[in-house]
Amino acid sequence: MKPVLPPILMVDDEPNMRETVSELLMDDDYLVDVAESAEQALEMLSEPGAAYFMMITDGRLGGMSGYELLKRAKEEWPNMPVILITAFATPKLAVEAIQSGAVDYLSKPFAPEELLHAVARCRENYGLKQENKTLRAQASTSSPIYQLHQIVGDSPKMEDLRKFIETVAPTDSTVLILGESGTGKELVAGSIHHLSSRQEKNYIRLNCAAIPENLLESELFGHEKGAFTGALRTKTGRVEEADGGTIFLDEIGDMSRPLQAKLLRFLEDGSFTRVGGNEEKRVNVRIIAATNRDIVQAIKDNDFREDLYHRLNVMQFRPPPLRDRGQDVITLAEHFLAKNCEDLGRASLKLSKEAENKLMTHQWPGNVRELRNVMERAAILEGTDEVQPENLPDFELESRLSGSDAPQSGGEINYELGFAESVAVFERKMIQSALESNQFNVNRSAEMLKMTRHSLRYRMQQLGLANATKGGGDSDDE
């Protein structure tokens, strides 16, 4: 049985020819719509929701010719195949038809098998295009990176995050994901879609910061032909592509306020209008948005609409920064290291205890993304079977980027961190420096810091440094 296809549009001003060709095609299980003129055909093609698998037209019609219809059709619907039929065949007309975009050119009278063979070639091409479209959709929705088990980490915060995803995913609630760059916001969004009832539909991702402001509305909602300079044909927007599925709006904090207003309207009832159009359209889409900006400060600075924030903030996720995930640093490092070794085709590597210590005492301003890059570097550079600390970055630039360097006397103080966080940063740096100076021996580090071993152990635990000791354990031998 042939797959169900959209109809074929048959255009001819002779009733007998329309009937003969239509019956021939329908006997071969094709759906057929007919038009008596080029003008009627263009009206049928332009109707909202119209979809035709291909068009067959006579070259000579009353009014607009089939050749002109062919040219108009290829301008408006460039992907629709057109077969042109004529009783006045000449080499010149054949060349003109092919140059105008016809996929085939048949002379009257023609054998039924000749027409059916030409239509079958168009059907085969259509099937390949649909298969490619399906494969692209599957690639965007079912990639392993979007499955929940790919969220690696055993810390309590990550366990809570996974449980929250499992609870929220089956609903259609709007989701807002906040957090620093590199914490895995896109992974959370993809996991929510993968566990939802929409998982078989499209998962569309749009980075609002990566598209120029003047093009973002068109990318999101689409545009009509002639809406602006360069709009040569009607374009479907990403929200239409996501109909029935999910759209992930990353870096939504970078969206302009005028477009925020239009997004707010869309969130209310799923309605929108293409740029340059008047027709109101409506889709059923789940919205997941994310930003690394301080959203409250953005609202205070009048950069982000408070009403849009409240509309997005139905379910809020905050993936924790890597510095707050304790031993997950090592778990993730081993995970990335194994993957990089596999990709490079080299024997698996382990982390030396010295390398583990260095990873555990770093602040990770770039979060998981930074750690992934560090492990890629280690897999490339390491010449032994264990990653040595010298094949890890010195983290000097990364520490400066994080703003975590303790201020020197008379130096500039970063008031944005607040008092408590600034004290914690300074305390962590001081303890980290003492541990490194004493080869991570707790007894000697406690003496240097003029505090008891028990107090140092407690502060290390509070600051996520509990495993940054000799051997990664509790040994304090001299």
Image (cartoon, helix red, strand yellow):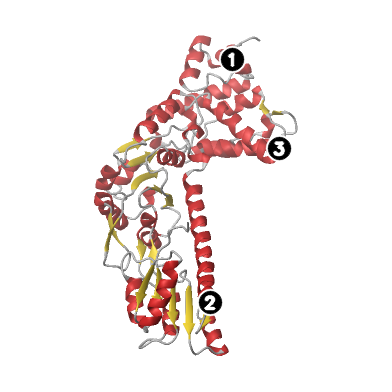
Q: Is residue 349 visible?
A: yes
Q: CA distance from mark 3 to mark 1?
A: 27 Å
Q: Residues within 10 Å of mark 1 (few under 14, many from 20)?
A: few
The correct choice, above or below, for 397 with respect to 389 in the image is below
Under circle 2, the secondary element is strand
Residue 326 is left or right of residue 199, and the answer is right
The correct choice, above or below, for 12 with respect to 173 in the image is below
- Which residue lies under the disc numbered 1? 473
On residue 381, the disc is: 3
Q: Quadrant of residue 186?
A: top left
Under circle 3, the secondary element is helix
Q: CA distance from mark 3 to mark 2?
A: 58 Å
Q: Position of residue 344 (x, y in %)?
A: 69, 40
State which tag comes first along the sequence, 3 or 1: 3
* 348 and 157: which is toward the camera: 348
* 297 and 94: which is toward the camera: 94
Q: CA distance from mark 1 to mark 2?
A: 76 Å
- Which residue lies under the disc numbered 2? 104
Q: Quadrant of residue 277?
A: bottom left
Report the mark closest to the observer, 1 or 2: 2
State which tag comes first along the sequence, 1 or 2: 2
Q: Amino acid at mark 2?
A: Asp
On residue 186, the disc is: none
Q: Amino acid at mark 1?
A: Gly
* 24 and 424: which is toward the camera: 24
